[in-house]
Amino acid sequence: MAGNNYEFPYEVDAEAEAAPSLISIEQLQRLVQALDSSDISELELQRETEGVHLVLRKIKAPETHAQSDGTIVMAASSVNRTSASPPEKFAPEETHHKVVAPLVGTFHVWAKPRGGALVAVGDRVKAGQLVGTIESLNVLNEVETTVAGRVIEMHVQDGQPVEYGQALMTIDSAEGAKKA
């Protein structure tokens, strides 16, 4: 690791030679400090002759605040979950789902030419319901929704060209749970 000013414990001290398969606490602490103070995200130590394989990886730690007396206070978002109760959900379940174009072509709100619109803003839809078509190479390809709910927004107008993965409409699945 030329260019870095980090010292890695390559040499084994006399204590570690007595138990060659063990890494001393001091060596481990130096490895962790070197990892923390560098821009690398993973450090791997292998001693094949002793059968030792150690991998240290950086992960995003919970937010902590050090107080003046040296104690560390964890942020309120980290909760002790040693109880038997299931973990709490921090983020509310996503209820807005986008119906996306499965291919490139021209979007239509109808299933047949000169037919009526399949869905409009405010309509309730069922999972698997036909909500539009995409004309590609003079072939009409059906577009179905994967969730039940209420159409809350149309992103594409009838006759507009669309690309693969482009959002066509947004469906609020929370509205699907409330049957009219």
Image: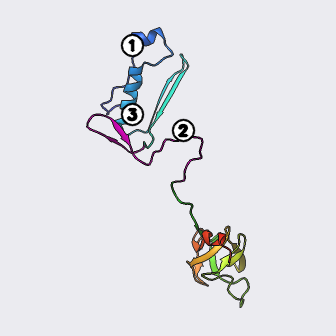
> Which amino acid type is marked by label 3?
Leu
Q: How is the image coloured?
A: rainbow
Q: Is residue 14 left or right of residue 169?
A: left
Residue 121 coordinates in the image, percent (x, y):
60, 82
The circle on residue 83 is none
> Which amino acid type is marked by label 2?
Thr
Between residue 169 and residue 49, name the one nearer to us: 169
Mark 2–mark 3 contact, CB under 8 Å?
Answer: no
Between residue 159 and residue 170, name the one nearer to us: 170
Please state the extent of the stretch shown in magenta in the rendering. Answer: 62-89
The circle on residue 82 is 2
SS of the residue under disc 2: loop
SS of the residue under disc 3: helix
Identify the residue shown where x is 39% and y is 13%. Answer: 13
Q: Residues within 10 Å of mark 2 (few under 14, many from 20)?
A: few
- The residue mark sitting in front, 2 or 1, is 2
Mark 2 and mark 3: Cα distance apart in space:
30 Å
Quadrant assignment for the N terminus? top left
Quadrant assignment for the C terminus? bottom right
Is 85 inside the magenta-drawn segment? yes
Q: Residues within 10 Å of mark 3 (few under 14, many from 20)?
A: some
Residue 131 coordinates in the image, percent (x, y):
68, 77
Of callouts 2 and 3, the N-terminal one: 3
Of callouts 2 and 1, the N-terminal one: 1
Is 162 inside the magenta-drawn segment? no
Residue tagged 3: 35
Residue tagged 1: 13
> Which amino acid type is marked by label 1?
Asp
Q: Residues within 10 Å of mark 1 (few under 14, many from 20)?
A: few
Mark 2–mark 1 contact, CB under 8 Å?
Answer: no
